[in-house]
Image: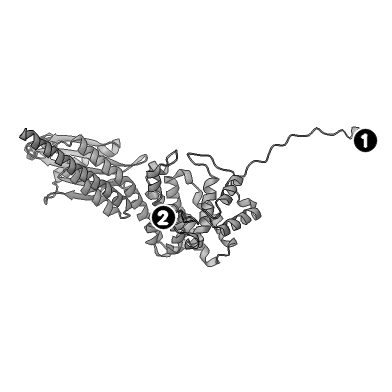
């Protein structure tokens, strides 16, 4: 009984330890997804995957679109010894197999199996176990997370749980890697001369449209309409360029939202909405690092605040919300309502305007609502998704002769 009790205690301790480590990974996943530094992301992913699966070392390699090669971005070694040239060559073979098949590759072979490639020195080299998991972005592979271990004199194969753990980490890393790559591109674009900024904006919006096809063209439409409304509200002309940039970039934080949430064909659940609500802050973090875009921050950060204080991310109320954000929020809502979504059809212009009026003083600033209604009345060409005119039954043509006779 004492032995059984001791075994039970050890098993429970092991489960608790594993549970704590998985909880740690979940929290680390949030930290990884919030990072915009690509090297920081891949370094943490390599470390976490190696430690979770108790590998001897791990690595992350990313696909380079220019050369078509896998480029090693980081390695993590639990021991001080560096990975040998032979070991790396074998692992690279598995990496390429993972990329070609776009599936997890898990293998365990005695080192002697590689003798034909490296000679007799591999005869007593123990056993190599490798797990390679693709970083799959929709239909392409952006890279690979790999963990390996060399074991002397016993089997080193990874367990099913260890493989699943590496896959979980890779799944968390996909969004972080994508947003870090896109952010690096954005920094490169933004560091170009400001004269070419309009082209840069279009390139960034194209990248966002490619990720979120549902909102394709949305940014251009709301930017145009926001400028019309801002002018009607008497905003100084010198501020309009920053308002336009903010309107164009307002959804750029969605680059960091997982595709499963962003492209869900149904309404989001509470947890998914919580993820979606992070995009204004993520957008602000991205843009705040680019000096000449800082004046655009009010729209990025506050366009989901409500006039009555019920919005996010800060719950600001009334004039605590910057005017440009109050202006943009109406335009953004109007365009969303009059556009198709995976879970509903577009409203007509008339229905959307009625919804804006109902929410005056709640979601929207009443003064801005009045200006928006006046703008739409004065500029019918700005209206979106007008209702078709009602059908009218044709009346029978009167007979002039009969009329004359009746007279």
Question: Which one is nearer the viewer's eye here, 357 or 346?
Answer: 357
Is residue 66 in view from this perspective?
Answer: no
Is residue 282 in view from this perspective?
Answer: yes
| Residue position for label 2 | 313
Which residue occupies 60% across, 52% down? 382
Q: Position of residue 100 (x, y in %)?
A: 29, 37
* Residue 289 as seen in the image, left or right of residue 363: left
| Cα distance between the residues tagged 2 and 1 | 74 Å
Question: Which one is nearer the viewer's eye here, 5 or 152?
Answer: 5
- Which corner quadrant holds the N terminus? top left
- Which corner quadrant holds the C terminus? top right
Q: Position of residue 317 (x, y in %)?
A: 47, 59
Question: Which one is nearer the viewer's eye here, 39 or 10?
Answer: 10
| 10 Å crowding of disc 1: few (<14), some (14-19), many (20+) | few
Q: Quadrant of residue 12?
A: top left
| Residue position for label 1 | 404
Against 206, residue 368 (above or below) is below
**SS at mark 1 in the image:** helix
**SS at mark 2 in the image:** loop
2 or 1: mark nearer the eye: 2
Q: Position of residue 307 (x, y in %)?
A: 50, 57
Which residue occupies 60% across, 57% down? 370
């Amino acid at each position: 009984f004492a032995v059984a009790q001791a075994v039970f205690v050890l098993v429970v301790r092991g489960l608790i330890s594993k549970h704590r480590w998985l909880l740690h990974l979940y929290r680390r996943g949030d930290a990884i997804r919030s990072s915009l530094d690509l090297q920081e992301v891949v370094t943490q992913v390599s470390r976490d995957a190696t430690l979770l699966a108790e590998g001897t070392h791990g690595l992350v390699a990313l696909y380079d679109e220019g050369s078509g090669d896998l480029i090693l971005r980081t390695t993590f070694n639990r021991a001080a010894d560096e990975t040998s040239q032979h070991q790396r060559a074998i692992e690279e073979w598995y990496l390429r197999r993972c990329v070609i098949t776009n599936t997890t590759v898990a293998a365990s072979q005695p080192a002697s199996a590689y003798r034909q490639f490296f000679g007799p020195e591999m005869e007593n080299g123990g056993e190599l176990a490798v797990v390679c998991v693709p970083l799959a972005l929709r239909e392409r592979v952006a890279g690979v997370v790999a963990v390996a271990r060399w074991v002397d004199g016993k089997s080193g194969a990874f367990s099913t749980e260890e493989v699943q753990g590496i896959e979980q980490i890779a799944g968390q890393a996909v969004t972080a890697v994508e947003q870090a790559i896109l952010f690096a591109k954005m920094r490169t674009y933004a560091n170009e001369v400001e004269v070419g900024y309009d082209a840069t904006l279009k390139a960034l919006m194209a990248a966002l449209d490619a990720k979120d096809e549902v909102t394709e063209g949305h940014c251009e439409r709301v930017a145009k309409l926001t400028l019309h409304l801002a002018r009607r509200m008497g905003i100084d002309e010198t501020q309009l360029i920053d308002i336009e940039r903010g309107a164009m970039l307002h959804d750029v934080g969605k680059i960091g939202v997982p595709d499963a949430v962003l492209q869900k064909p149904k309404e989001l659940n509470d947890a998914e909405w919580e993820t979606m609500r992070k995009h204004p802050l993520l957008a602000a973090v991205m843009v705040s690092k680019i000096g000449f875009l800082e004046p655009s921050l009010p729209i990025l950060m506050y366009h989901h605040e409500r006039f009555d204080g019920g919005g996010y991310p800060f719950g600001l109320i009334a004039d605590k919300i910057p005017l440009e954000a109050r202006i943009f929020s109406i335009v953004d809502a109007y365009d969303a309502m009059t556009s198709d979504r995976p879970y509903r059809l577009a409203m007509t212009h008339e229905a959307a305007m009625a919804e804006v009026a109902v929410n005056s003083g709640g979601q929207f600033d009443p003064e801005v609502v009045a200006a928006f209604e006046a703008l739409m009345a004065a500029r019918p060409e700005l209206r979106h998704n007008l209702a078709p005119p009602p059908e009218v039954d044709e009346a029978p043509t009167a007979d002039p002769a009969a009329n004359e006779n009746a007279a």
